[in-house]
């Protein structure tokens, strides 16, 4: 399949390309596009056969439901059975933006999009290209991240091209994604509100609407028989670069000392080692390949850089990546959730 790639300027949109991409979606094709979270791979959410193509292109397990993206508030009505009072408050506060709500689905949601569950995940993105694409398609767009399943999600169009060229019809390129991590998912079919996946809309922000909102305890720890994530997709190996990832967690000075000791051990064994550091610590590692995620004082810079940094280490063919840990508060919860999953929960405490 030939993949058409068009770069767009978010400040002055090329309407003809968006219209063309929208028609491709409407007619059953696949289009990758930017959002404020990560790049998405979209298809007509109302057509079962179109949605199935997403699973094929990504190699995604079929029991992992997709998020349906809408452009305007009135688009939600046909997709769900009901919107509870609290769900309405969440959407009024955080849409458009990086928050997905799980709601009871209506009969027009095809089985492939919801993995035959009675509920559906819905989000209204804020990215202007994403919203204009949905409007041009004139249908809601089902879209997971635009990567081969299991790999870190793309936050830059070059990474979409790397993973999906030849597998999709169209790639719309925009800017680097603002948040860099997938949306916060909240389950609004239960009370109190349960966070199924942390993201840019933090627990602290959600508690302004539902003071009892909580994070599914299974997603921050290594899953086991008694502790299974509620979101079907969270059980899979995810966000994983080719290299092995290890996290060192604890006091920052002790972390630096431990990482330097580990680096020396890997070098002694002729392994290429990468260190995922921060602006505050990057000069504390004399050996190994050091990349900075951003400043600890600005966790959005860290979230924005996480997936791209994991992919950069793969480009540099490191065998192992050792990462510093982050405090689990605010966006740090989402950063640590992705980091722990990419490391298969291999955490060294100091
Ligand atoms: P992705 O598209 O890769 O960002 O993943 C979408 C996430 O949303 C996965 O972890 C899914 O399991 C989750 N999800 C989508 N629909 C539902 C649903 N109806 N109930 C629970 N989780 C869902
Ligand atoms: Mg994904």
Image (cartoon, rainbow, N blue to C red):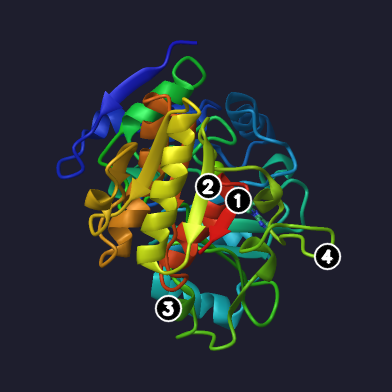
The residue identified by callout 1 is 346
The residue identified by callout 2 is 246
Residue furthest to the left in view is 12
The residue identified by callout 3 is 205
Q: Nearer the viewer, mark 3 or mark 1?
A: 1
Q: For mark 1, give the secondary structure.
A: loop
Q: Are marks 3 and 2 in contact (CB under 8 Å)?
A: no
For marks 4 and 3, the one nearer the N-term is: 3
Mark identifier at residue 226: 4
Q: For mark 2, give the secondary structure.
A: strand
In x, y percent, where is residue 56? Answer: 64, 25
Q: For mark 4, give the secondary structure.
A: loop
Q: Taking 349 as reference, is 318 above or below it?
A: above
Dividing the picture into quadrants, the one containing residue 205 is bottom left
Lateral position of residue 153 relative to residue 308, left or right: right
Decide which of 323, 102 is in the foreground and name it.
Answer: 323
């Amino acid at each position: 399949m030939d993949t058409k790639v068009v770069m767009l300027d978010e400040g002055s949109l090329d309407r003809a390309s968006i219209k063309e991409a929208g028609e491709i979606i409407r007619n059953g094709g696949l289009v990758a596009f930017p959002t404020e979270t990560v790049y998405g791979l979209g298809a007509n959410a109302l057509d079962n056969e179109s949605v199935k193509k997403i699973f094929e292109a990504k190699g995604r397990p079929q029991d992992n439901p997709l998020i349906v993206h809408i452009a305007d508030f009135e688009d939600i009505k046909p997709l769900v059975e009901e919107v509870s009072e609290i769900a309405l408050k969440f959407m009024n506060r955080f849409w458009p933006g990086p928050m997905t709500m799980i709601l009871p689905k209506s009969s027009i949601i095809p089985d492939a999009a919801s993995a035959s569950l009675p509920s559906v995940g819905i989000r209204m993105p804020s990215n202007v290209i994403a919203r204009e694409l949905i409007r041009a398609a004139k249908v809601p767009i089902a879209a997971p991240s635009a990567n081969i399943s299991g790999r870190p999600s793309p936050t830059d169009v070059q990474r979409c091209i790397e993973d999906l060229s030849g597998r999709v019809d169209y790639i719309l390129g925009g800017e680097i994604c603002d948040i860099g991590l997938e949306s916060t998912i909240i389950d609004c079919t239960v009370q109190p509100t349960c966070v199924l996946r942390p993201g840019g809309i933090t627990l602290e922000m959600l508690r302004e609407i539902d003071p009892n909102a909580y994070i599914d305890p299974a997603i921050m720890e290594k899953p086991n028989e008694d502790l299974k994530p509620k979101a079907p997709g969270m059980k899979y190996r995810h966000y994983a670069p080719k290299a092995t990832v290890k996290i060192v967690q604890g006091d920052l000075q002790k972390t630096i000392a431990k990482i330097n000791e580990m680096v020396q051990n890997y070098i002694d064994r002729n392994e290429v080692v990468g260190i995922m550091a921060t602006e505050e610590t990057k000069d504390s590692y004399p050996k190994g390949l050091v990349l900075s995620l951003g400043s600890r004082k600005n966790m959005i810079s860290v979230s924005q850089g996480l997936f791209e940094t994991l992919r950069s280490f793969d480009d540099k063919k490191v065998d192992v990546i050792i990462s510093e840990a982050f405090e689990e508060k605010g966006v740090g919860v989402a950063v640590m959730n992705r980091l722990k999953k990419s490391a298969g929960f291999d955490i060294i405490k100091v």
